[in-house]
Amino acid sequence: MQYLAMRSYDIRQNLATEQYLMNNDKIKLPMVLFYIEKPCVIVGRNQNTIEEIDQKYCREHQVTVTRRLSGGGAMYQDLGNLCFSFIVDANSHQFGDFKTMVAPIVNALHEMGVTGAEVTGRNDIVVDGKKFSGNAMYTRGGKTFSHGTLMLDVDTAEVAKTLQVPQDKIESKGIKSVRSRVTNLRPYLAEEYRGITTEEFRDLLIMKLLGVDNLTAAKKQEYQLTSADEQQIAALQQQYYNNWDWVYGQSPKFTVQKRRHFDSGTIDARILVEKGHIKTIRFFGDFFGTNDVHELEIKLQGIAYNEAEIARILNEADLNSYFQGIPRQKVIELLAD
C-alpha cells in the first residue's frame, strides 16, 4: 500500500489532491492519503450549502467552506482532526460498504487503546455510542475513494456554531443536540498516546497500517508529488474547491418542497411546477449514490406532476444508484404525496 501525508493545512488543496490521485493512472492501488486542515466546513456533494452552514459565523471566524465530490453530510474540521482517504479499485470493494473499507483504521485504533471503536449506522465510527468519525464514498473511472474524519481533539463547540443541522435529522437520531453525540478520541487512547499531536497520531496510524515500526521504513512506500502533479492539483483546486459556483451554486426557485429523513439519508426535493408539469427539480440531501443525481433530475423534467407519471419515471430508473439504501416506493411516495 502506498501512502501520502499532505503537508498542506488547506482543505481545498487537500481535496484537490485526493481528486487528482483518483484521476491519475500512475497511482498504484491501494493507496491511503492523510491530511489535516485549519478550521473548515466541508459540505456533501448534494447539499444546499447556504442552508447547511451559518454563513455569517464562518465568514467572521475565517472558517473555510468548500464542497467535496462525495455525498453525505456537512462536517466541521480543525487542526485537532485527522482525515484519511483510501483509494482502491472499484471492483475490489462494494460501494457503501464502509465497515470493510475502514476496518484497517478501526483495527489500528484498537491497538492504540480505543478498544470500543466500532462502525455503526451507515457511515459512522463510534465509541461509547458517540461519533468520532464520519465517512463518505465516491466512485468514478474504475476507482473508489472512501474518506473519513478522526476527531482526536476537535473543538466540538464549533460544530454547533458553524453548522445548521436540520431538526428532523437531530430528532431521527434521538438526541437533543449535535454536541451530545460526538466525542474526541484522546480520552480513549492508551495512556502512552494521550499527549500526542495530530501529526504524531497520523504517523502512528501510517506505521500500523503498513505494519512497520518506524517512519524511516514507512517512507519507502510514500508517494512523492512531482511538480507536474502539483500544477494539476492547483488547477483542480481553482476549478472546484475555490470556485464559488461549485461550493455554493444557485439556490433554485421552487413551488413545492418535499423533504424526508430515511435511515440511509435525507432527500430534500425542490420542484418548480408550472401549468401542472415539472419545469425543474433539484435533489438536495446527505444521501449516497454511485451516479450523479442530476441524471434523474433531467428525466423528471417536463412530465406531468402527478403520481402516475412520477412513478413511471422512477420505476424505469435504477434508484439505488442515486439514493443508495432508500426503497424505491418510499421515494415515489415522497415526491407524489
Image (cartoon, rainbow, N blue to C red):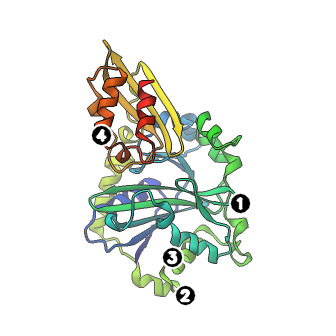
Residues under numbered marks 2 and 4 in contact, where contact means CB atoms less than 8 Å apart: no
Residue at 51% from the left image edge and 86% from the top image edge: 212
- Whole-Å distance between the Cαs marked 2 and 4? 50 Å
Residue pointed to by mark 3: 206
Image: 35 above or below 258: below
What is the secondary structure assignment of the residue under circle 2? Answer: loop
Q: Quadrant of residue 284?
A: top left
Residue at 71% in and 75% down: 190
Q: Is residue 24 visible?
A: yes
Residue 238 x %, y %: 33, 49
Q: Earlier in the sequence, mark 2 or mark 3?
A: 3
Amino acid type at circle 3 is: Ile
Q: Which residue is mark 2?
A: 213
Residue that numbered label 4 is attached to: 317
- Dividing the picture into quarters, in which one does residue 195 lie? bottom right
What distance separates the C-alpha of mark 3 from that of mark 4?
42 Å
Residue 165 shows in this picture: no
Describe the element under mark 3 as helix, strand or loop. Answer: helix
Using the image as rendered, state which of residue 274 and residue 211 is in the foreground: 274
